[in-house]
Image (cartoon, grey):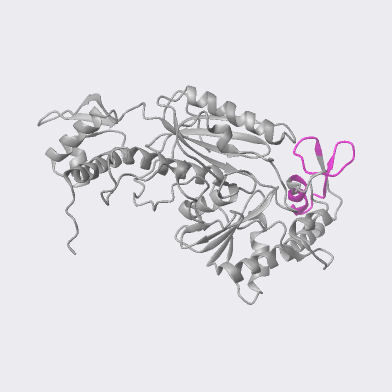
Amino acid sequence: MVPPKPTLEMLRALTDENVLRALMAEARLTRAEIAARTGISKPTISDSVRRLSAAGLLVDTGERTTGRGRVGSYYALAPDLGAALVVALTQHRVTAETVDALGRVRDREELELGPGAGAEAAADALTGVADRLAARTPGGLRLAVVSAADPVARTTGRLVRLPDAPFLIGDLDPRAALGAHVSGPVQVDNDVNWAARAEHADGRAHGTDDFVYVHLGEGLGGAVVCDGEVRRGHHGFTGEIAHVWTVGPDDTAMPLTEVFAVLGLREPGSTAVDVGALRARLEPGDGDVVREGGGKGGSDGGCQRRGDGRGRARADETRTALARAIGPVLEAAVAFADPRLIVLGGTWGPALAETVARRLAQSPRPVPVIAASVADPELTGARTQAIEELRRLLVDSTHPTDRTGHPPADPPHARPRPSSHAPAGADPRPNTHAPVGADLTPATHHRTQDIP
């Protein structure tokens, strides 16, 4: 069967896509420069630039080339195309950014949450930062990508309580909280999955398509990456390891989360790990962390360290106990996921990587264990996704039909359940548009703040 010939409309849409993606890679270009970068003829590029300018997607910057030859006009993406909202939500704070199609951070807000703030306070904070950022964004917020420090239901995007696992934020629906401020889809996934994506893109798992990422912080979690994709499972709970049974400090079987209770490394009145106390105990010679008033704990404020000569021995004992507890969990991951690599991240995971690596090297199926390297991996992973989705949204706006000649698919909120590895609310279509040289550095702008 002879395939149908592409229509003129399809060819124009493909040219428009090439022009847009060239201008997503570089802030301004002349028509001649676009033609050189895309390999498309100058007359065809000129027609595309006229169409895109008439549609409000491109603007003449008013700048002109200098030197010999014909004067060229510089074109850029229109400044009012809107932005994507990126949110990192934890029990302590809401961090929100807006990013444009060039990959630049245009604006940022960070709002602290009080101790034990809960879901209602988190929802109010989320709504508040979105409202303020939307008001300052020309073109509004076109979509949102949310990282949450709790399990996330794959079909609904809601945060979910699991048995024997820390529930850090609470019963929150980020899509509902952001719905009035974002005109397009809201994608939600847990922070560990976003961290794994960031480590795969730019960290020590770069080039490794099969690995397990383990987050060790106040909460405990994991992500399984197979064939370069995060696998979320039927409910979206793949990698929720807190309730996995393992070996406790006294050689009895217990859930991983209970190990920290036995070691006295839980936050008071919570199943969350007391990171301050754990870090102090892992530092040789520093002894206990003592809260003012005499109680042990891990908050950063109001604490003093007391070295009593037993610090080094206790640090070794704690490392050994943690490695013995974490080892069987990783061995189970190896058995089911067959990873090439295991990456330890989180606030204290990297500090334990060498000890855990020695422990796992003695197992029947040894796998290398390394420390994560990406800073703010949850926000970094969500930001990268937001940039890609914003670019795709702008490109798709130029396609009257898709490449099969059929009308475009329904918007993400109206589509069937996404594939098992897609974030909740994600476009389930394959990303056939390769990202064009994303510049993830903050833009020079009066509201832009530096991202570490």
Instruction: Give the image location of residue 174, x and y in percent.
Output: 58, 37
Q: Quadrant of residue 38?
A: top left
Give the residues in magenta.
276-303
Residue occupying image coordinates x 19% and y 31%: 50
Residue 311 vs residue 447, the one in the foreground = 447
Question: Going by the image, does 208 lie left or right of 344?
Answer: left
**How many marks can you see?**
0
The answer to if 271 sits in the magenta stretch is no
Q: Residue furthest right?
A: 294
* Nearer-the-camera pick, 319 or 419: 419
Where 249 sits versus 440, above or below? below
- Residue 280 falls within the magenta-colored stretch: yes
Between residues 169 and 435, which one lies in front from this camera angle? 169
**34 horizontally vs 25: left or right:** left
> In percent of the image, x 25 and y 43: which residue is there?
18
* Residue farthest to the bottom, as pictured: 364
| Quarter of the rendering containing residue 14 | top left
Q: Position of residue 74 (x, y in %)?
A: 23, 30
Residue 90 x, y percent position in the rendering: 64, 40
The residue furthest left is 69
Q: Residue at x 46, y 45 (%)?
A: 385
What quarter of the picture does the N terminus occupy?
A: bottom left
Q: Classify residue 214 as left or right of residue 411.
A: right
Q: Is residue 204 above or below residue 378?
A: below
Q: Position of residue 382 (x, y in %)?
A: 51, 43
312 above or below 388? below
Foreground residue, 286 or 302? 302
Considering only vertical position in the picture, is 78 above or below 438?
above
Position of residue 78 in the picture relative to residue 141 (left or right): left
Q: Residue at x 25, y 49 (%)?
A: 405
